[in-house]
Image (spheres, coloured by chain):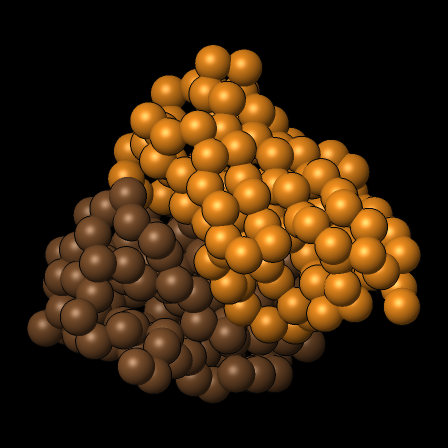
Chain colours: A brown, B orange
Amino acid sequence: DTGVSQNPRHKITKRGQNVTFRCDPISEHNRLYWYRQTLGQGPEFLTYFQNEAQLEKSRLLSDRFSAERPKGSFSTLEIQRTEQGDSAMYLCASSSSGGNTIYFGEGSWLTVV
Amino acid sequence: KQEVTQIPAALSVPEGENLVLNCSFTDSAIYNLQWFRQDPGKGLTSLLLIQSSQREQTSGRLNASLDKSSGRSTLYIAASQPGDSATYLCAVDQAGTALIFGKGTTLSVSS
């Protein structure tokens, strides 16, 4: 069991550039979640997938953010035209179904300069 | 709108002490409640999950209780150790989908 894997772990980008994060969930898990966490705060929900279907999106997920999960396996989170306010840790998590224990990855740190 | 509050925000204790972390939530219509541990700069590790129909869960030195009617949960840590130093996060699940987190309690255990 390799757990939830996220890449890259750290990304520094200039304002206005696009960035993409990848998440590989635990293999048998059909649910995949994305959260965002800033210093001193708890994680905030962004979106989740049931297999390949994106079932819920937070109002935090502006139109500059897009997430995909082709074939219900790995997922990508793309941020277009990054802003300094996007600087945060982006956490991916997976679970076998709703209401069960959720397993988080180590997170991807984004710094926008 | 569900809100989750954790008190205290920070706690420092000497090794060996028993301690209690508190979590409160405003809407008692929850699916479950989970406690997580987060080390600095790392992801979250699940500690305990309490379903809405349960009153408590135990794992080793950890015991979590849930009182849905009053909107409260506690995480009890027995015989604390320096390795327990971390931030502890409480999260409620209202619909089997998104977790709503508190800001966490940062625990420091000194040897």
Left or right of B72, for residue B1: left
Quadrant location of the C terminus of chain B?
bottom right
Left or right of B43, for residue A48: left
Q: In the rendering, at what x and y percent does residue A30 appear?
A: 17, 62
In which image quadrant can residue B72 be found? Answer: top right
In which image quadrant can residue B110 be found? Answer: bottom right
Q: In the rendering, at what x and y percent does residue B24 appear?
A: 60, 27
Callout count: 0
Please name whichever residue, B97 or A36, is drawn nearer the observer in this view of the structure.
Answer: B97
Above or below, comparing residue B70 to residue A53 in the picture: above
The residue under the point 20% across, 52% down is A97
Left or right of B2, for residue B78: right
Q: Is residue A41 visible?
A: no
Q: Is residue B7 visible?
A: yes
The residue under the point 75% across, 57% down is B80
Left or right of B104, for residue B82: right
The residue under the point 60% across, 72% down is B42
Above or below, comparing residue B104 to residue A13 in the picture: above
Q: In the rendering, at what x and y percent does residue A85 appear?
A: 62, 59
Please name whichever residue, A59 or A94, is drawn nearer the observer in this view of the structure.
Answer: A94
